[in-house]
Amino acid sequence: MILLVVCALAAVSLATRPAPPEPFCTKPGCMASIKCWTDWMDCDNPTGTGDWETISKLKKYYPKNMCPNPTAIEVATVDGISLADAGNVFYANDHITGLICKNADQEKCFCRDYKVRFVCYPPFCGNQKLCWTKWYDRDNPSATGDWELLKTLRKENPGEICANPNAIESRTVDTDTPATVTGQDFLHFSPATGFVCKNGPKQKCRDYKVRFACPCGPVLAELAVERDES
């Protein structure tokens, strides 16, 4: 009878023990398809000759936020106006040079103040020895927007998220739709900062959840067990 009780308790313990952390990349060559956006960056203003948001300057101002070889660029004014609606002409606007808007090239006004961000690939986004954290959803978009900042999540969930995640994933809470295909604009969407969608005149943010890719190892495995036993 005692042996049966011990076996039963062991079976219950095994049944409730959580699965190991989900690997970030499980298929051969899957890292080739992983990409991520940098944070928005703004290192200049148009008060002089124009707004010069060049790759070389951005790497000096934001050395940790720029990958060596970005593959695409997105541009908007610092107050959120799209490039199509900004009304300026540009001397350069590509992922190799960055953005250059010269005041002398404008017919009726000066350049607006712009921000830029870039698409990057591994190793900036991650490597093959990463595991995903659990999903986090600490905010809802009822006020200014949905704020899922890394520093806040780490403070509210001590020991669960590494200090420097290699990648971030965000999906809607209700339909599990990837944030990248919702058509919404994000203030922050990077592993260094976290995720922020701001409400505005042109968009009402959906409710998002996030998770981070951290180095695999005993820390994540131990955390999974601790969460189960608490």
Image: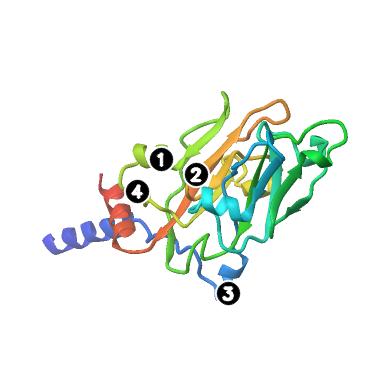
Name the residue beneath numbered marker 3: 29
Q: Are marks 1 and 3 in contact (CB under 8 Å)?
A: no
Give the mark, 3 or 4, whose residue is nearer the N terminus: 3
Name the residue beneath numbered marker 4: 160
Instruction: Work out which residue is located at the far left of the displayed protein and give it.
Output: 2
Which quadrant of the figure contains the N terminus? bottom left
The image shows residue 198 at horizontal and vertical percentages of 61, 32
The image's colour scheme reads: rainbow
Residue appearing at x 30%, y 52% in the figure: 223
Q: Is residue 92 visible?
A: yes
C-alpha span from label 1 to label 2: 8 Å
Specify few, some or many for label 2: CA neighbours under 10 Å numbering under 14, 14-19, or 20 or more: many
Question: Of helix, strand and loop, which one carries label 2?
Answer: strand
Above or below — where is 65 with respect to 68?
above
Specify few, some or many for label 1: CA neighbours under 10 Å numbering under 14, 14-19, or 20 or more: some
Left/right placement of residue 144 relative to residue 159 reads right
Name the residue beneath numbered marker 1: 151
- Using the image as rendered, state which of residue 169 and residue 65 is in the foreground: 65
